[in-house]
Amino acid sequence: MRDIAVFSGSAHPELAEEVCSHLGVPLSPVRVSRFANDCLEVQLQANCRERDVFLVQPLVKPVQEHLVELLMMCDAARGASASRITVVMPHYSYARSDKKDAPRISLGGRLVADLLVAAGASRVLTMTLHSPQVHGFFSVPVDHLHALRELAAHFRQYDLSRTTVVSPDLGNAKEAAHFARLIGAEVAAGAKQRFADDQVRISSVIGDVAGRDVIVLDDEIAKGSTVFALLERLRELDARSIRVACTHGLFAAGALRRLSEQPDVLEIVCTNTVPVPAEEHTGKLRVLSIAPALAEAVRRIHNGESVSALFDAQPIA
């Protein structure tokens, strides 16, 4: 592919390498240095002039460090006369800050979107936003992918004749229903109340799970508070087997280890939108690659083709 340059920040260079491998282009080098006063400096070490530039950087821990790095990459590309700058942000962590549910709080999702545009981003490519309406926080075009095709391809290896896809809450029920249609399963949803970041109560499950094989589907798992609360209800309702799936496997505060220790959880499935440290991998974890889908989206953006057509296709090998 001519006239394209792909750069990666320090958040997830392995994913960027994989995307470039599928595109058949080299990953261009980036130098990130720190001054004595703790300020960052970013240099893109390849020609950007009149080129289609893609900057790969999920916002993962340390989020603020990686965000500033991404903003500086945008600014560097703009200053180097890039013809277009696309931020490839597989995980937009600030999407969770999408509403004013308490007095005098900031809308981080919108603020960070404004910062990216101010820094020079021409468009954004992201995956499975926590809330779809966050798409509207950006004043530039946003291509919003999901990982349901990849997840569905994985689960089709099992007997799904008695399977129910369960969303932990009503907010994710539409996504769960879409996934259930892809694999020919039924759908159910939990009635969730959140009292704090890590305090969740699920009072009931709407739908049939008794004696059925359950796939718990969420957009992300951080501390896992929601999933653990849902597991309690599923046990009370006599679910036959339980598998857990999400797009963004953040697994903070030992969540992956604690989930793996649940004897009735047969499998935990996530994608590589965020890096999962090798030392945290367990025998129950399956990490699916979304690099082929991101690469195909990058190719289509570069060539001016439809990205929405990806949703009607089979998983990309």
Image (spheres, rainbow, N blue to C red):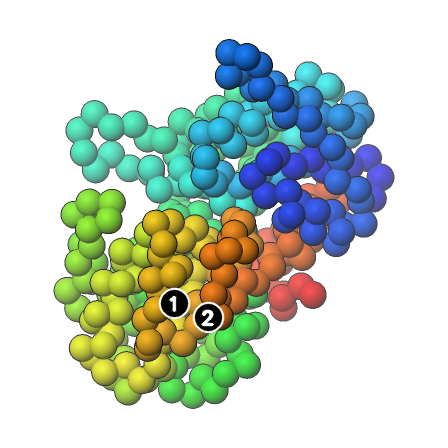
Which residue position holds label 1? 260
Q: Residue sitting at 66 percent across and 30 percent down?
A: 85
Residue 292: image tag: none
Q: Which residue lies most toward the right here?
A: 2
Q: Amino acid at mark 1?
A: Ser
Q: Identify whether 263 is placed above or below 76.
A: below
**N-terminal of the two: label 1 or label 2?**
1
Q: Could you tell me residue 19's position as x and y percent? A: 69, 49
Image quadrant for the N terminus?
Answer: top right
Q: Identify whether 92 is placed above or below 110.
A: below
Q: Could you tell me residue 75's position as x and y percent? A: 61, 20
Which residue position holds label 2? 284
Residues at badges 1 and 2 in contact (C-beta under 8 Å)?
A: yes
Q: Residue sitting at 36 percent across and 31 percent down?
A: 108
Front residue of this view, candidates 8 and 307: 8
What is the C-alpha distance between the residues marked 1 and 2? 6 Å
Q: How many marks?
A: 2
Image quadrant for the C terminus?
Answer: bottom right
- Assign a secondary structure to mark 2: loop
Is 206 on the left or on the right of 152, as rendered?
left
Rate crowding at label 1 as few (under 14), some (14 to 19) or many (20 or more) other CA atoms within 10 Å. Answer: some
Q: Is residue 42 visible?
A: yes
Q: Is residue 50 visible?
A: no
Q: Could you tell me residue 242's position as x and y percent? A: 35, 76
Front residue of this view, candidates 117 and 235: 235
Q: Amino acid at mark 2?
A: Lys
Q: Residue sitting at 47 percent across and 87 percent down?
A: 159
Q: Residue sitting at 64 percent across and 54 percent down?
A: 291
Q: Could you tell me residue 271's position as x and y percent? A: 53, 58
Front residue of this view, candidates 135 and 291: 291
